[in-house]
Image (cartoon, grey):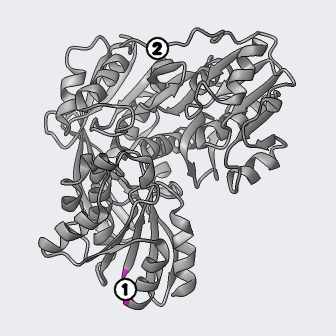
Amino acid sequence: MTIKLMNLKQNIIPDNTKKIHLTAICGTGMGALACMLKDIGFEVTGSDQKVYPPMSDFLSRKGIKVSEGFTEDNVSYGPDLVVVGNAVTKDNPEVVKMRSMGLNFCSMPQAINRFIAADKKQIIITGTHGKTTTSSILTWILYEAGLDPSFIIGGILKNFDSNYRIGKGDFIVIEGDEYDTAFFDKGPKFLHYNPYRAVLTSVEFDHADIFKDIDHVKQVFDVFVSGISEKSILFAFDGDSNVEELVRNRQCRVEKYGKDTGSDWQLGSVSINPPWSVVEIIKQNIPFGTFKTELIGEHNLLNALSAIAIADSLMIPVEVIAGALETFKGIKRRQEVRGSKRGITVMDDFAHHPTAVRETIRAVKPFYPDGRLVAVFEPRTNSSMRKVFQNIYPLSFNEADLICIRKPPLLEKIPPLDRFSSEKLVADLNNSGKNAHFFPKTESIIDFLAKEAMPGDVILVMSNGGFDNIHERLLDKL
């Protein structure tokens, strides 16, 4: 795959760098990088179009000056380096000024590699689904094993109340994103890293704004897998035909995990005793151990399985792994209970891809057997607002008892002929015998559920955005 570079001065990071500016600082990854750079002694500034809590408060507490909006003035002071976020275009006024001043610049993963991960053994977690959860479980295992890991992950780990950490140990865990790197580097972010260990959880079509089709997605994962050293180990999920194709005949060692009896690591028997899941793990057809965790759903237990496999490859004792899984508190916005009123539980989850929606509903339902599962879904990603998954989403809600679908809030960004229809999804669900309702705005969902919800119900809210703070507003109304 060819990585397209603009004809600009870039990829030069001066050895005497002291002052760093981050353009588009308020993204999860860029904000974490800014804090890490500040922690290791750099003078850090930043700017973004939308500066608001919690990221604005987070950066302010670190003493990082953040400017509202993109202007030439933000870089006129002459930083030694500008880190350019991937949402920034070549026409951005800060980029134009940066070029005219001849400033050095790089992308977020380049900065991570140079300043944070250069001397670490990099553990890169990739795949369409499960990256954040897998990265988080593994990080906590490493920490509990006394290995003092660093990490940069796309979610807030409750055990650390942070999505980043700079440790003194040998390992860094990085959530490897297949999304493009920057306007001057259209390759995926994960190509910038050098995996000591890697995980490939799944490969499905997603990010319809940058990938044409599933073959295009497989192409970038192929480049990643091809680049893994023969001295490294790749842990690959055995239940995905795309993954199977991608890991065949590679130079690195490949260990498979999942439910296949021929795999190196197998998920054995699972019993549910809320809030606990108890799972048996099998290594090379020999019982490895029994683990207790508050993670729910088979997809999360498979994520845990890959983390266990990596931990074992690093010689971490099984009793340490078991203790870490039992004390792992989870990640914010991943099946996170936001509150309960009148016996009605409101849960938040990041699910937006059809597979993630289906597996999240399937995971949550057994833990709330006494009431209905009410699925509330807001399609707002670049993929879910497009009709690419129009005929697939109806199958994702099979196990929900009551379904509320919001109109995509940013639909005007999508060409009319490519737009997803929430109304059609609701019609298809009702035609299949489900109880589904369409809502043009968040307020109407809140009013509806305040009347309809009953004690014992769990209201599962799924969106990759803030969803107009529906969780707190619904709890207030209940």
Nearer the N terminus, badge 2 or badge 1?
A: 2
Furthest residue in direction right, as rendered: 77
| Element at label 1 | loop
Q: Nearer the viewer, residue 181 or 138?
A: 181
Residue 25's place in the image compared with 389, above or below, is above
- Could you tell me residue 410's position as x and y percent? 46, 55
Q: Indicate which disc residue 456 carries.
A: 1
Q: Residue furthest front?
A: 416
On screen, 201 above or below 223? below
Quadrant of res 66: top right
Distance from Cα at disc 2 to Cα at disc 1: 54 Å
Q: Report the residue marked by disc 2.
A: 4
Q: Residue at x 25, y 46 (%)?
A: 388
Question: 45 or 150, which is in the foreground?
Answer: 45
Quadrant the N terminus occupies: top left
Principal secondary structure, stretch drawn in magenta: loop
| 2 and 1 marks in contact (CB < 8 Å) | no
Q: Secondary structure at mark 2?
A: loop
Bounds of the magenta segment: 452-457
Residue type, label 2: Lys
> Of residues 257 and 181, which is closer to you in this image?
181
Q: What's the residue at 34%, 62% (across, down)?
A: 277
